[in-house]
Image (tube, rainbow, N blue to C red):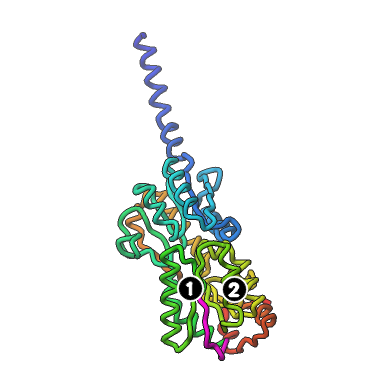
Amino acid sequence: MTRREFVELLSGTVAAWPFVAHAQQGALRHIGVLGADAIVWNSWTVAFVARLRELGWVEGDTIDIDYRWAGGTSGRVSDFAVEFSRRHVDVIVTYAAAAAAVKQATTTIPIVLAVASDPGAGLVASLARPDGNVTGISIQQCELIGKRLALLREVVPHLRRLVIMANAGYAMPMLEAQEAKATAQALGLEAARPEIWRSEDITPAFEAIRGKADALYVVSDALIAANRTLVTTLALSARLPTMLSYGDYVAAGGLMSYGPNFANLFRQAADMVDKILHGTKPSDIPVEQPSKFELVINLTTARAIGLTMPSTVLARADKVIG
């Protein structure tokens, strides 16, 4: 090679460096979303993607999002967690019940919990300093029990017997169920909890409580959420007033809910993902809490079960359906 050829080759290589760097900076980032149910999560993931777009991340252009749906099955959660780990996605967005399996699959890929009842229970070191590779949003389910039961007693003045429906297969739903039972008993109520381990247990549970309950408190998780239409339909058939975790249940036919707006939670999760994709470590992103809790009421359901909704409760509702 002559000196001139060498200089020309070197010049061409140096000139190409900025383009190589640009290609690396503009490389597609990969997000894995491990959710409970595609239908339940649809409006939430729409909000998530919309917020990412507002932050400059465009699906198919600067980010690639892969969705996996566990359907409340723990085995599928583990399989999908391992899949995302092997593919080395840039961040995994999921929910609390799946977090342990995801965390077991990877200690390096950032994990954002868009929905977490209590991430402090072994998932993060502390809310202010999560440590490790997990952060997210705490929806404070146990802290809302007192408010929910107070609303239920206001709406159902004759309330004496309360049934608490929860998935017995996971720790966090059971913790809320136990807290709800203790709180109800402290208020002088009888409280029962049917065993729900799988979808097939839901219908027999309603048959067992028919005529033996004045109201139903539903603890939401992946299994219950995936069967929310069945739960609300059976409650309506049994003419049971229901207290639910969030407004989507009420839109599906439940009586009322008090809790966070889940679409807003996923927008918060998108903000966290944006920080991570820009280089912030999950351990440096404090666990957040909802900025607002909403009371949603379905008047059509109230009329169907023969219940008159007090005007004082309606006046405090953030959204009324029907």
Q: Residue at x 57, y 89 (%)?
A: 312
User: Neighbour class for label 1 at 10 Å: few (<14), some, many (≥20)?
Assistant: few
Q: Position of residue 190 (x, y in %)?
A: 48, 85
Observer-nearest residue: 127 or 211?
Answer: 211
Mark sitting on residue 206? 2
Q: Residue at x 45, y 89 (%)?
A: 188
Highlighted range, magenta? 156-164
Q: Quadrant of the C terminus?
A: bottom right
Q: Quadrant of residue 123?
A: bottom left
Corner quadrant of residue 214: bottom right
- In the image, taking residue 21 as reference, residue 298 lies left or right, namely right
Q: Is residue 149 visible?
A: yes
Q: Earlier in the sequence, mark 2 or mark 1?
A: 2
Residue 214 appears left or right of 94? right
Helix, strand, or loop for circle 1? loop
Left or right: 86, with 50 as reference point:
left
Between residues 194 and 3, which one lies in front from this camera angle? 194
Identify the residue under disc 1.
292
The reply to whether callout 2 and callout 1 are in contact (CB within 8 Å) is no
